[in-house]
Image (tube, rainbow, N blue to C red):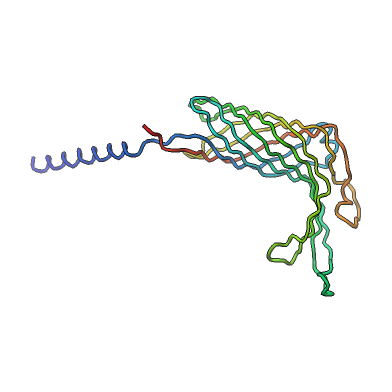
Amino acid sequence: MKITIPLLFAFFSFHMAFSQNEDREPPAVTFGKFTLHFTLGLPVQEFAEAMDGHATGLGFSFLMDIPETPVSVGVQLDYLSFSHKKLRVKSPIGNTGFEGDYDWTTRSQALLPGAVFRLQPEHGFLLKPYGEGSVGWRRLFTNTTLSDRNSTGNSNSGTHLDISDWSLYYGGALGVTVALAPEVLLDLRCNLVIAPSADVYSKKKDAGIVEEPLDAFELKHPASTNLIMPEIGVSIMLSKEEEY
């Protein structure tokens, strides 16, 4: 009995302390998510005929949940690199009489900032499908950069914008998320982007020997610049403590 009473007292004291600690630390409530993803850009229809191949790139999205609904709204940004041509050249270093080694590179690229609307009903299954709608600006551009190959600091010695085309785009996506950890999700989706015609530089299939990297490209004008964009990413859930 002398041992039992102190043990019971210790047990109830520990239980009360634990309960009070739970009261002081309310559960967290998710209010949004940040996603970083890798992207493939697959031109379709006239755009596929104009371009020399697919693009690769990175993107991110930031979504805020609308309370008590399966709807999230936010922003997204995707960057795609289609193709490039690099020449290694020697160029005079000021008036020193010496020459430096440089990379002369032309790149064909795309930038897609926009707003996104997601519908993802909540349920208890492992796979959580969703649908999205998006609208924003599509920029197709090609630039040529001269960079110092031997520089350890800022090697960019000059950039020239060869062509740039902005237009509105709209699109839709289907995707699915899978929980990897309590606040980490694997995000898989496929996005269709619809955009109008544009002037674009496409890399020639057989450019041969060129004097400038831009000579390896040819200017084309596809009737549309539609893209299919498969993406794989990781989402970080954003949460805050619930207030009682």
Residue lying furthest bottom in this view?
97
* The N terminus - image quarter: top left
Q: Quadrant of residue 127?
A: top right
Counting from the top left corner in percent of width and height, residue 101 is at 80, 66
Residue at 85% from the left image edge and 38% from the top image edge:
50
Q: Nearer the viewer, residue 188 or 63?
A: 63
Rendered position, 208 above or below 235: below
Q: Is residue 137 left or right of residue 105?
A: left
Q: Quadrant of residue 165?
A: top right
Counting from the top left corner in percent of width and height, residue 98 is at 82, 73
In the rendered picture of this protein, how many numbered marks are placed on residues? 0
Counting from the top left corner in percent of width and height, residue 215 is at 89, 51
Q: Nearer the viewer, residue 50 or 178?
A: 50
Rendered position, 131 above or below 205: above
Rendered position, 44 above or below 213: above
* The C terminus - image quarter: top left
Residue at 73% from the left image edge and 34% from the top image edge:
228
Residue at 81% from the left image edge and 70% from the top image edge:
94
Counting from the top left corner in percent of width and height, residue 133 is at 65, 28
Q: Quadrant of residue 35?
A: top right
